[in-house]
Image (cartoon, rainbow, N blue to C red):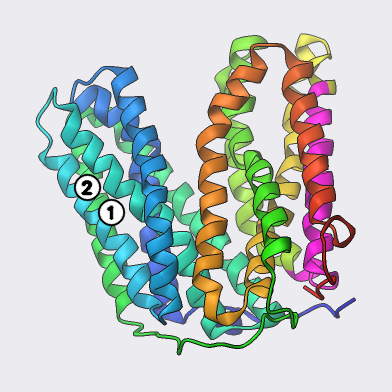
Amino acid sequence: MATTTKIRPRALVRASGGPRYAAALAVDALGTGLLRPFLLLYGVTVLRLPASATGIALTVGAVAGLGCMPAVGRWLDRGARSTVVAASMLVRVLGVALLLATPPGHVWPFAAAALFIGIGNQAWPAAHAALVATVAHGRERDAALAGGRALRNAGLGAGALLATACLAGGTTALQALAGGTGLAYLTAAALAWSVHLRAHPATGPAEDGDDAPAPRMGALLAANVVYVFCLNITEIALPLVLVTQLHVSPVWAAAIVVANTVLVVTLQVPVTVVMSRFARRTVLALAGVVIAASYLGFLAATALAPGWAAPAIAAVSVVGTIGEIIYAGSATALVTALAPAHVLGRALARFQLSTGFGLAVSPAVITALASHGEAALWGSLAAATLVSAAAVTPRGCRGRTPRG
């Protein structure tokens, strides 16, 4: 058991890559928040594309973007850091430019724009984690990763609120939002590139002293596909249940999303620092238990009378958000602790592949399970998450137990 790490704000910024890099993260998140929630709306209203074709293009773009991850991993392992982060932002500038240049009624240019935006979105997390792992180590690195996530959620929330306020302007406002997003990505790329950070390719062992983490990584990556479903619960599963099955006001779903964002922004770093007294693998398993408990809580809440179900679901969503915070604060940190330095980029790329795959399939899985009733939805998710939690515990993995 380790002692709790105390991280001061200035040290956290320094461990996260410095003030310019923190500014790049904030600007990038603000730009993403401006457009991401309304990209489907842009395709339907501005480009006058069918909703089905727009949705398919966005899904294909996000999934195809995962194809870049092996190359990103190799690039990182050659020592690139801030350059890869900047490239992930610049490729999204190209996507936004294609978006603005797409004539109404043309789906293929829109699909190409979605692809480039998807490539940037998929490459960024691994590049960011590798950069932080280069400038910070141990529990300070864990806190820095948590701080980056809190900052990103704050930027996403601010961008989404700003975009919502601008929607009254119709088509012209959406085009302006897209242009603003491109400028934000370009500014963020310039700030990230100005950090000029590289890592000397290393051949040393992993932080826990094990230079062959592949068996444990395999279990972690498989479990992560299930864990990552929790990130889509507030945006997909709960609105689906509240609006289409319980027939309550959509305001409840919106309030839960806002509460989730506020909790992540305010609690991500403190919770991660408190959890630093325990082994990362134990914390990740605990996250699975908390998330599974929230799923069972949702199941119980839906059985209540109509007037009580929505408030109960909102209350249980706080538990789910705490589980999400614990998961986000331990999963990437565990990967960086397990991976030998000379394959850190490829390890993070594989982790992002598992994350991207889980996020891609979760909407289809959630909606399919929901069509069979509440027990099928929440019971299946709880069971799968508990199995995943057991798989990531030290006893659930083969080989010597890591200190991470």
Instruction: Residue 288 in the image: state x and y as whole percent.
Output: 79, 47
Badge 2 local density, few (<14 within 10 Å), some, or many (20+)?
many
Instruction: Residue 307 in the image: state x and y as whole percent.
Output: 77, 13
Vertical side of 16 occupied by 232: above or below: above
Q: Identify the residue under disc 1.
A: 92
Q: Can the viewer see residue 312 in this picture?
A: no
Q: Which residues are magenta?
A: 273-299
Tell me which residue sits at (57%, 41%) in the image: 358
Q: Is residue 40 left or right of residue 253?
A: left
Instruction: Residue 306 in the image: state x and y as whole percent.
Output: 76, 10
Q: Which mark is residue 96?
A: 2
Vertical side of 180 occupied by 113: above or below: above
Q: Secondary structure at mark 2?
A: helix
Q: Can the viewer see residue 108 in this picture?
A: yes
Q: Is residue 351 left or right of residue 303?
A: left
Tell me which residue sits at (33%, 42%) in the image: 35
Tell me which residue sits at (30%, 77%) in the image: 193
Report the amino acid beneath label 1: Arg
Q: Nearer the viewer, residue 337 or 98?
A: 337
Q: Nearer the viewer, residue 62 or 48?
A: 62
Badge 1 local density, few (<14 within 10 Å), some, or many (20+)?
many
The stretch drawn in magenta includes residue 286: yes
Quadrant of the frame with the C terminus = bottom right
Label 1, label 2: how many angstroms apart (C-alpha)?
6 Å
* Quarter of the image where one finds residue 12: bottom right
- Marks 1,2: beta carbons within 8 A: yes
Q: Is residue 400 left or right of residue 102?
A: right
Vertical side of 75 occupied by 259: above or below: above
